[in-house]
Amino acid sequence: MALYKQKKNHKGSGNRLLISITVLGSAGPIRFVVNEEEIVAAVIETTLKSYAREGRLPLLSSDLNNFVLYCPIAGTEALSPWETIGSFGVRNFMLCKKPQVGKASIDEEKQAIVRKGNSSWKAWFNKSLNLKISSH
């Protein structure tokens, strides 16, 4: 009787796929089986849970809204969270953090100021060393 119920549930669930998701910055992909009708947002959530359960580094947040999933055949466009994972016809994906426009631009400005300050200090130091060496 239980065997009959398993067949009935499996038949209605559609095809299952073994997918491989590479998390940017992590060593090796995460692999698991999903239903081909599963939406991208659910796949991202499952990936983040598996990543945390395995204790992988770097540490990631558990908020799926901070991440995007890319497909090699879709180019540089992130996949829509409402599309089905089986609609792309591939099994390899890449998970990346969403770019943060406001915070990143402030950090880049700070780094540019620090670099500019360091480069002028380094230039002055190198110039003063060259003067001392050439005067001998």
Image: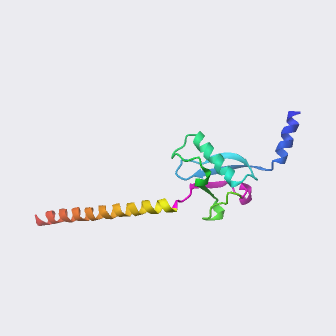
Task: Quarter of the image for the N terminus: give it.
Answer: top right
> Hey, which quadrant is residue 88 in on the image?
bottom right
Residue 6 position, x and y percent, is 83, 39
As drawn, is 108 to the left or to the right of 88? left
The type of colouring in the image is rainbow
Identify the residue at horizontal 65%, vertical 48% (top origin). Answer: 45
- Depth check: give the residue in front, 29 or 36: 36
Say which quarter of the image contains residue 133. bottom left
Looking at the image, the residue that sits furthest to the left is 136
Which residues make up the magenta segment? 83-100
**Which residue occupies the extreme top position in the image?**
1
Magenta stretch contains residue 97: yes
Residue 98: image location, x then y, percent = 56, 58
What residue appears at the point 52 percent right and 59 percent down from the top-left corner? 100
Q: Is residue 89 left or right of residue 102?
A: right
User: Which residue sits at x=67%, y=60%?
Assistant: 80
The foreground one among 11 and 113 is 113
